């Protein structure tokens, strides 16, 4: 199966690994943890364009990520969204939100300072998340 990650997603994230349907990415923005699921399908822009079983698989993978963020990071709220206004490739954001984060209680889009994590901090968080995701038997870390 051929799959190309949109250049903006590739630039703004670190790849953590794959679920059966989705590539799992960690945003470099110093907020969250902020994970992004991208179905490994070419030219896919909307959830409803997936076959029904793959829609269910996306929901299973999304729920697993949300549960992990809630449990392991004690987030006050998990924000999940598939906007795609700037990046048309279907991708689903999963953001651990905290009452202490810069944008709380508003949405993160347009309400953060855009600061990215230092590379060493990003890599340490990526390794931590790969280990946590590896407890989900269908996850394959990269």
Image (cartoon, grey):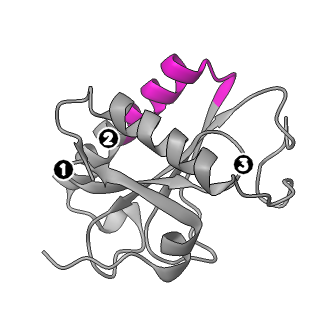
- Label located before the other in sequence (3 or 2): 3
* Local crowd size for mark 1, using a 10 Å CA cut-off: few (<14), some (14–19), many (≥20): some
Q: Is residue 6 left or right of residue 118?
A: left
Say how many tags the image has: 3
Q: State the separation of the CA atoms marked 2 and 1.
A: 8 Å
Report the residue at 63% width, 77% height from top. Answer: 86
Q: Are marks 2 and 1 in contact (CB under 8 Å)?
A: yes
Marker disc for residue 30 = 3
Report the residue at 50% width, 20% height from top. Answer: 72
Q: Of residues 33 and 42, which is closer to you in this image?
A: 33
Label 1: which secondary element: loop
* Local crowd size for mark 3, using a 10 Å CA cut-off: few (<14), some (14–19), many (≥20): some
Task: Choose top left, top right, bottom left or bottom right for residue 109.
Answer: bottom right
* Local crowd size for mark 2, using a 10 Å CA cut-off: few (<14), some (14–19), many (≥20): many
Q: Are marks 1 and 3 in contact (CB under 8 Å)?
A: no
Residue 53, above or below 104: below
Residue 10, above or below 55: below
Q: Is residue 31 left or right of residue 68?
A: right
Task: Choose top left, top right, bottom left or bottom right for residue 84.
Answer: bottom right
Q: Of residues 25 and 51, which is closer to you in this image?
A: 25
Report the residue at 53% width, 62% height from top. Answer: 13
Marker disc for residue 20 = 1
Q: Is residue 20 left or right of residue 39?
A: left
Marker disc for residue 61 = 2
């Amino acid at each position: 199966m051929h799959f190309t990650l949109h250049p903006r997603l590739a630039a703004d994230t670190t790849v953590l690994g794959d679920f059966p349907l989705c590539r799992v990415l960690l945003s470099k923005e110093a907020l969250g943890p902020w994970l992004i699921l991208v179905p490994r399908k070419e030219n896919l822009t909307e959830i409803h364009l997936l076959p029904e079983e793959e829609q269910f698989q996306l929901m299973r993978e999304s729920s697993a990520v949300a549960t992990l963020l809630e449990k392991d990071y004690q987030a006050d709220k998990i924000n999940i969204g598939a906007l795609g206004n700037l990046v048309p490739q279907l991708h689903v954001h999963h953001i651990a939100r905290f009452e202490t984060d810069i944008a709380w209680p508003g949405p993160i889009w347009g309400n953060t300072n855009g600061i990215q994590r230092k590379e060493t901090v990003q890599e340490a968080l990526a390794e931590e998340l790969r280990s946590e995701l590896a407890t989900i038997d269908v996850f394959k870390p990269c």
